[in-house]
């Protein structure tokens, strides 16, 4: 599968399915692993990194990912690598400095392996909605298949050995992509984010560590992987997010009550006006307005589109996706023109 084919495929994790999908777009479990016989990527020589990638690719071809796409990042253009980062298949860091990195992706983009970033491999499983336990089950099943061919670095006292100490132990990062528009509009979001570290959680932007929060979309995940089992970690994060979902729905209900409903309707329908009428639209504007539209959908209002369409537009309106659609690099204004046109067509079916 080439990148143009990937562009045309629907991302399985972005579909409007799964528990609490009106608040939780997707759940993801990542397992960081390193080969016992090789130095961490940050210290390894090119020949060693190339050998690691060959070994991981060979093991993946004997796993659930045998029919997946196998990509060597140094052979891709900058736009292609950014495209993969925008789809959450590689990290922004690996996209910008690919070195001898690689990625293996299944047809629905719900199971993949990133190679030679901070660790030798990071395997990911994604599910739509709030279902971390299923994501963990899939990730662990893939790890089990890979471990038949790969000897992962492990110590009884420390668990799986990783480049960053915060990943020691399970090497697991259980995360959910949540839409907290109600808490954001209600003015509760800062207090909520301040409380997360006490629960062992951390909030990041749309693309994870070091990325900006836009449109009240957040990644919520465990802060460390040491001291608990994989099952305990995924269950703890899922339980905390269930509480977060209840608070978000309560906030949405309060916004609809009394005189506040008119102000909320104005916010939602102004956003719809921009999305269906604008001729220039930045990505940050698109995120802001799509957030408001998604909120309207969650309240059952008669608004254009559906959850699946909005989820996909959050991905398709990013810069590299627009360049892929156009078949050429685009300047900022050309991106804004194409973004606005794409959103109008998808929401009005014209």
Image (cartoon, rainbow, N blue to C red):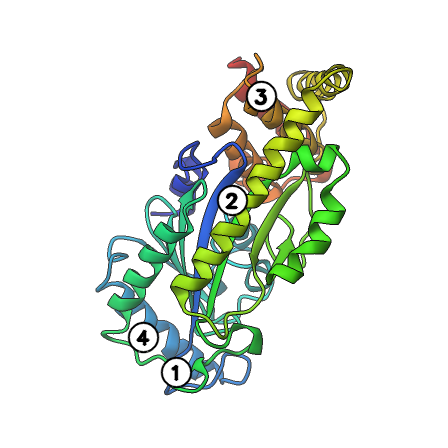
Q: Find residue 43 and report its image quarter.
A: bottom right
Tell me the distance, in whole angstroms, between the alpha carbons under discs 1 and 3.
48 Å
- At which x and y percent is residue 224? 55, 69
Comparing labels 4 and 3, the label whose residue is closer to the camera: 3
Mark 1 residue element = loop
Mark 2 residue element = helix
Can residue 322 be seen?
Answer: no
Q: Residues within 10 Å of mark 4 (few under 14, many from 20)?
A: some
Q: Is 49 situated above or below 273? A: below
Comparing labels 1 and 4, the label whose residue is closer to the camera: 1
Q: Residues at badges 1 and 4 in contact (C-beta under 8 Å)?
A: no
Tell me the distance, in whole angstroms, between the alpha carbons under discs 4 and 3.
49 Å
Comparing labels 1 and 3, the label whose residue is closer to the camera: 3
- At which x and y percent is residue 11? 41, 40
Dot 3 corresponds to which residue? 299
Dot 4 corresponds to which residue? 55
Tell me the distance, in whole angstroms, between the alpha carbons under discs 2 and 1.
34 Å
Q: Earlier in the sequence, mark 4 or mark 3?
A: 4
């Amino acid at each position: 599968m080439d990148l143009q084919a990937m562009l045309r495929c629907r991302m399985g994790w972005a579909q409007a399915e799964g528990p609490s999908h009106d608040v939780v777009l997707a759940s993801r479990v990542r397992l960081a692993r390193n080969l016992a016989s090789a130095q961490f990527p940050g210290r390894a020589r090119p020949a060693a990194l190339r050998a690691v990638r060959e070994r991981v690719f060979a093991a993946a071809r004997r796993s659930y990912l045998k029919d997946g796409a196998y990509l060597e990042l140094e052979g891709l253009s900058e736009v292609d690598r950014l495209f993969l980062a925008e789809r959450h298949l590689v990290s922004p860091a690996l996209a910008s400095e690919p070195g001898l990195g690689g990625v293996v992706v299944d047809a629905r983009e719900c199971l993949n392996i990133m190679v030679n970033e901070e660790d030798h491999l990071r395997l990911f499983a994604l599910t739509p909605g709030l279902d971390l336990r299923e994501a963990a089950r899939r990730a662990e099943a893939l790890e089990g298949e890979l471990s038949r061919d790969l000897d992962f670095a492990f110590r009884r006292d420390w668990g799986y050995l990783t480049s960053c100490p915060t990943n020691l132990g399970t090497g697991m990062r259980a995360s959910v992509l949540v839409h907290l528009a109600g808490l954001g509009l209600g003015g509760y979001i800062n207090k909520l984010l301040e409380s997360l570290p006490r629960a062992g959680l951390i909030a990041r932007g749309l693309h994870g560590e070091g990325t900006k929060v836009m449109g009240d979309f957040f990644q919520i995940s465990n802060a460390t992987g040491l001291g608990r089992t994989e099952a305990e970690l995924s269950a703890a994060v899922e339980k905390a997010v269930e509480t977060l979902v209840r608070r978000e729905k309560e906030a949405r209900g309060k916004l609809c009550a009394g005189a506040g409903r008119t102000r909320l309707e104005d916010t939602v329908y102004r956003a719809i006006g921009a999305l269906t009428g604008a001729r220039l639209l930045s990505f940050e504007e698109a995120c802001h307005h799509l957030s408001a539209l998604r909120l309207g959908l969650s309240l059952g209002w008669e608004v254009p589109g559906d959850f699946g369409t909005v989820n996909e537009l959050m991905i398709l309106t990013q810069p590299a996706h627009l360049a892929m659609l156009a078949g050429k690099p685009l300047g900022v204004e050309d991106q804004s023109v194409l973004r606005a046109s794409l959103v109008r067509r998808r929401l009005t079916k014209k």
